Image (tube, rainbow, N blue to C red):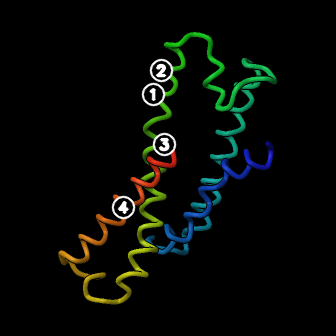
Amino acid sequence: MLISSITFLWIGQILYPSFIAEMKEPKDFPKALAALSILELILFSVVAAVGYNYFGQYSTAPSIGSLLEPWQRKSAFAFVLVPTVIIGALYANVAGKFIFKRLLGNSRHAHSHSVVGWGTWVAIVVAFWAIAFVLGK
């Protein structure tokens, strides 16, 4: 259980190479990574400590499910929905870029606004979201 929690907590690190490639100044990435890691550590530690303090050792995962009143759970999940969609969009974007580059390579469609390029991009992103919704259901 602990290993899977740590894996899901830090899985966003996989996206870093893609973000570095798009930075205006890639040399600034170590500073951005340090700031992000410190903020993540503080945020996740505080949330875990507060959740453990109020819900106890046998809380559900995610701990929002341990809230007693249904309106509390619904309200808390409303705050989880937006970041989940944003994270999904980031992963779909990074994975889509990889597939897009593999399919179109260095053709003119990969670098210009052509119908083939945009059609391929839209098809890839729609396919990733469709697969995500099927797997998430």
Label 2 crowd (10 A; few <14 / some 14-19 / many >=20): few
Type of amino acid at the residue the image marks with label 4: Val
Taking the spot 24% from the left edge, 71% from the top edge, the residue there is 118
Q: Distance between the residues labelled 2 and 1?
A: 5 Å
- Residue hosting label 3: 84
What element does badge 4 sit on?
A: helix
Number of the label disc, if any, that sits on residue 54: none
- Give the mark toward the camera: 2 or 4: 4
Q: Which of marks 2 and 4 is nearer the N terminus?
A: 2
Type of amino acid at the residue the image marks with label 1: Ala
In this picture, residue 52 sits left or right of residue 12: right
Mark 2 touching mark 4, by CB under 8 A? no
Pinpoint residue 31: horizontal percent, then vertical percent: 60, 63
Label 4 crowd (10 A; few <14 / some 14-19 / many >=20): many
Type of amino acid at the residue the image marks with label 2: Ser
Taking the spot 26% from the left edge, 83% from the top edge, the residue there is 109
What element does badge 3 sit on?
A: helix
Label 1 crowd (10 A; few <14 / some 14-19 / many >=20): few
- Residue hosting label 2: 75
Q: How far apart are marks 1 and 3 (CA)?
A: 10 Å
Mark 1 touching mark 3, by CB under 8 A? no
Mark 2 touching mark 1, by CB under 8 A? yes
In the rendered image, the residue lying farthest to the top is 69
Q: How far apart are marks 2 and 4 (CA)?
A: 30 Å
- Give the mark toward the camera: 4 or 1: 4
Task: Give the camera-side residue of 39 and 80.
Answer: 80
In this picture, residue 82 sits left or right of residue 28: left
In this picture, residue 78 sits left or right of residue 40: left
- Residue hosting label 1: 78
